Image (cartoon, rainbow, N blue to C red):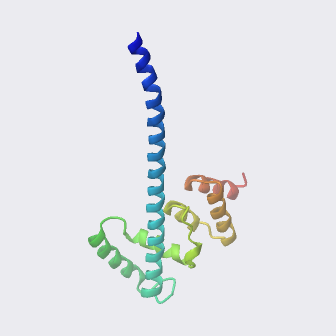
Amino acid sequence: MNQSNNLTTQTQPLSQLVTQIAQHIEQARSQVRQAVNSAMVQSYWEIGRLIVEEEQQGESRAAYGKQQLQQFSQQLTACLGKGFDVGNLRNMRQFYLMFPIHDAVRSELSWTHCRALMRIDNPAARDWYLQEAISQSWSARAMLNGKLKMENGK
């Protein structure tokens, strides 16, 4: 009976310790995800900039755009693996064109958020959704659902 009380007493502080450790690990994991996501968004912006400024001389599309993106896609995929299909390269190019000022790219938003924002044609509305997504910690899905409700007058 005394041994049972000792076990209960020992388990309680251990559970609190495990909870504290788990919280620290989850916080660290969240920070790592945020850092990786931020680096990827910045990288995609830079890829978009390079495509537009270096290969397209600042034009929204090169005269030979489809073939050029296809060639980039093949070479990047051979070199780096998946993630560089023509559609993704178009998204990166569009991302840069919609957010040509580097400081306008917010580290709080994921690539999914950025792609959703690119679907919003009105710059004022896009900026509003960007600010709300950050201040309200909206997921990209919540942001799109809000946009669709507003468009449908709900």
Front in this rendered view, residue 21 or 2 = 2
Q: Which residue shows up at 34% across the image and 78% down it?
A: 72
Q: Is residue 84 above or below residue 23?
A: below
Instruction: Tell how many labels.
Output: 0
Q: Which residue shows up at 26% across the image and 71% down it?
A: 78
Residue 122: x %, y % from top left: 66, 70
Q: Which residue shows up at 48% across the image and 71% down it?
A: 42
Front in this rendered view, residue 68 or 29 = 29
Residue 143: x %, y % from top left: 61, 56
Q: Is residue 75 above or below residue 125?
A: below
Looking at the image, residue 68 sits to the left or right of residue 121; the answer is left
Outermost residue, top side: 1
The answer to whether residue 63 is seen in the rendering is no
Residue 68: x %, y % from top left: 37, 82
Outermost residue, right side: 153
Q: Which residue shows up at 62% across the image and 59% down it?
A: 134
The answer to whether residue 141 is seen in the rendering is yes
Outermost residue, bottom side: 57
Residue 12: x %, y % from top left: 47, 26
Front in this rendered view, residue 18 or 29 = 18
Q: Quadrant of the N terminus?
A: top left
Instruction: State the image quarter where residue 86 is shown.
Output: bottom left
